[in-house]
Image (cartoon, rainbow, N blue to C red):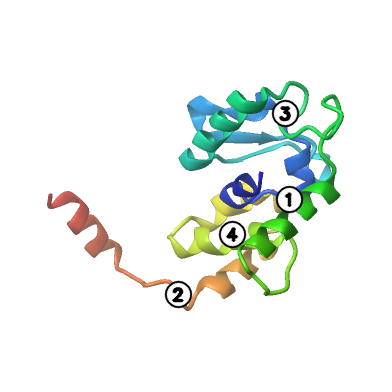
Amino acid sequence: MLLLIYSSGLRVSETVNLKPEDIIRNKMLLKISHAKGNKDRYTILSEIALIALEKYWKAYRPVNWLFPGKNKTDKLSIRACQHAFELAKKRANIIKKGGIHILRHSFSTHYIEIGGGLFQLQKFLGHKQLRTTLRYVHLAEEKIIARSPLDVYAEKYSK
């Protein structure tokens, strides 16, 4: 669950609302239904996350909700998801303050750092305004190593 939040840039409310049919394996996407603003969107699905989801599915066979609560017909609560994050931080001896939403922020910053497109990130995150997405550029700009497109394409096609 936490791996999926980080790897796809999900909000915790979006995560607990996922259904097994929201995994679109052939396109490596996740469908986010009724996200913020009651809009549907698609976000990226990591190959590593898909492998973890396959193992999870084989072990638990979720039906209605990808992450069911104690009663298998109910979805996991947001608070239970937050609690899982707090436990994971504790087990990893992470003392830095911050809630589960830091995984979404980390996805966004890291996506920009590896050269992901700003407009694509905006779509993945479901931001209505580009200026909301632009805050991640500021966080990542010092870590980006700028290269000329000429060098990148020359390297790519010279092999």
Image quadrant where one finds the N terminus: top right
Q: Earlier in the sequence, mark 1 or mark 2?
A: 1
Crowdedness near tag 3: few (<14), some (14–19) or many (≥20) residues, C-alpha within 10 Å: many
Q: Residues within 10 Å of mark 2 (few under 14, many from 20)?
A: few
- Amino acid type indicated by mark 3: Lys
**Crowding near the residue tagged with mark 1, few <14, some 14–19, many ≥20 C-alpha atoms within 10 Å:** many
Label 3 or label 1, whichever comes before in sequence order: 1
Q: Work out how far the residue at label 4 is from the one at label 3, CA to CA, in angstroms.
A: 23 Å
Instruction: Relative to 157, say whether 106 is above or below.
Output: below
Helix, strand or loop under label 4: helix
Tell me the residue at 56%/64% (across/down). 109
**Residue at the left extreme, as displayed:** 159
Q: Quadrant of residue 59?
A: top right
The secondary structure type at the circle numbered 2 is loop
Disc 4: which residue: 108
Front residue (pair 27, 66): 66
Asked if the residue at tag 1 contacts the one at tag 3, i.e. Cβ–Cβ closer than 8 Å, the answer is no
Residues 74 and 116: in front is 74
First along the sequence among labels 2 and 4? 4
Residue in the picture at 85% in, 43% down: 77
Compared to residue 100, the image places residue 66 above or below, namely above
